[in-house]
């Protein structure tokens, strides 16, 4: 029987909290250096470098803090997966990275001119690439498989954890949209995944999404190449190649 929506949300939150707690406990006695994660250290390293590349698919809070550091944004080439030219094409009712922090998203986009380069990859662009994923489990990518099942496909985390629902069992042969990964492919492998460029402006923040409109000036945006048919990407093959 399906749980009520609010109860389901709470159980999902608790499941993630437990997984994070387990990971923290495992790392307590590790020798992993987290000094590079210190914000002041990060800002100083960017200023000392000739430049930095920042690909953004989560909360805009870190980017906002970098914008507020004098001179730091001017060293950064930034690509963000954000906004849409058609709200009807959003995968979810809201856009995850905007919903996390609407104020920071608006602030960063309004400050995009401060970056050395700034590009937005709208929702419909990142959805132009599909990924096959049903072989993740048999190739050892269990954590990613569970993430896709729970977050993207809305399966019950308990059933996933107990092995009652799997990609290979219930979703064999299907494909999925992974906007952040598509953004990376369009940015760094544009020969295989061609794109066009345009300029956009933020017209309005509607709910927890950003509506872009094409314009003569504004934020540079990647759009799908007109007439190009993007082949489905084998997620396992891609991850194995990168690894």
Image (tube, rainbow, N blue to C red):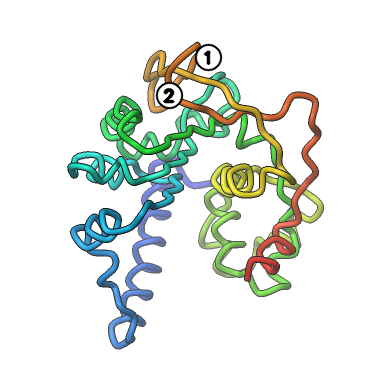
Left/right of residue 157 with respect to residue 205 in the rendered view: right
Q: Local crowd at mark 2 within 10 Å, few (<14), some, or many (≥20)?
A: many
Report the residue at 24% width, 55% height from top. 43
Left/right of residue 52 with respect to residue 142 in the rendered view: left
Please state the horizontal and vertical placement of residue 83, each as a whole percent of the image. Answer: 47, 28
Please state the horizontal and vertical placement of residue 18, each as a whole percent of the image. Answer: 36, 68
Report the residue at 18% width, 42% height from top. 70
- Look at the image and tell me whether residue 153 can be seen: no
How far apart are the alpha carbons under marks 2 and 1? 13 Å
Closer-to-camera residue (121/204) = 121
Q: Which residue is labeled 2 in the image? A: 210
Please state the horizontal and vertical placement of residue 73, each as a whole percent of the image. Answer: 29, 42
Report the residue at 61% width, 37% height from top. 126
Q: Which residue is labeled 1 in the image? A: 214
Q: Local crowd at mark 1 within 10 Å, few (<14), some, or many (≥20)?
A: some
- Look at the image and tell me whether residue 34 can be seen: yes
Closer-to-camera residue (206/35) = 35
């Amino acid at each position: 029987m399906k749980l009520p929506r609010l109860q389901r949300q709470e159980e999902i939150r608790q499941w993630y909290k437990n997984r994070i707690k387990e990971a923290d406990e495992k790392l307590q006695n590790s020798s992993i250096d987290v000094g590079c994660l210190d914000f002041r250290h990060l800002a100083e390293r960017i200023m000392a470098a000739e430049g930095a590349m920042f690909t953004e698919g989560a909360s805009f809070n870190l980017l906002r803090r970098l914008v507020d550091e004098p001179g730091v944004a001017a060293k950064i080439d930034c690509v963000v997966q954000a906004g849409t030219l058609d709200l009807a094409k959003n995968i979810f009712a809201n856009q995850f990275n905007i919903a996390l922090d609407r104020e920071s998203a608006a602030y960063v986009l309004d400050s995009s001119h401060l970056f050395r380069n700034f590009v937005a990859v709208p929702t419909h662009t990142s959805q132009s690439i599909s990924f096959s994923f049903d072989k993740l489990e048999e190739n050892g990518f269990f954590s990613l498989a569970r993430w896709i099942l729970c977050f993207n496909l809305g399966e019950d985390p308990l059933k996933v954890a107990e092995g009652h629902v799997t990609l290979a069992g219930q979703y064999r042969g299907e494909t999925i949209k992974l906007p952040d990964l598509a953004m990376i492919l369009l940015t760094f492998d544009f020969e295989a995944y061609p794109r066009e460029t345009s300029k956009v402006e933020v017209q309005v923040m509607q709910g927890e999404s950003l509506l872009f409109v094409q314009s003569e000036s504004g934020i540079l945006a990647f759009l799908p190449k007109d007439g190009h048919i993007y082949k489905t990407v084998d997620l396992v093959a891609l991850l194995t190649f990168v690894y």
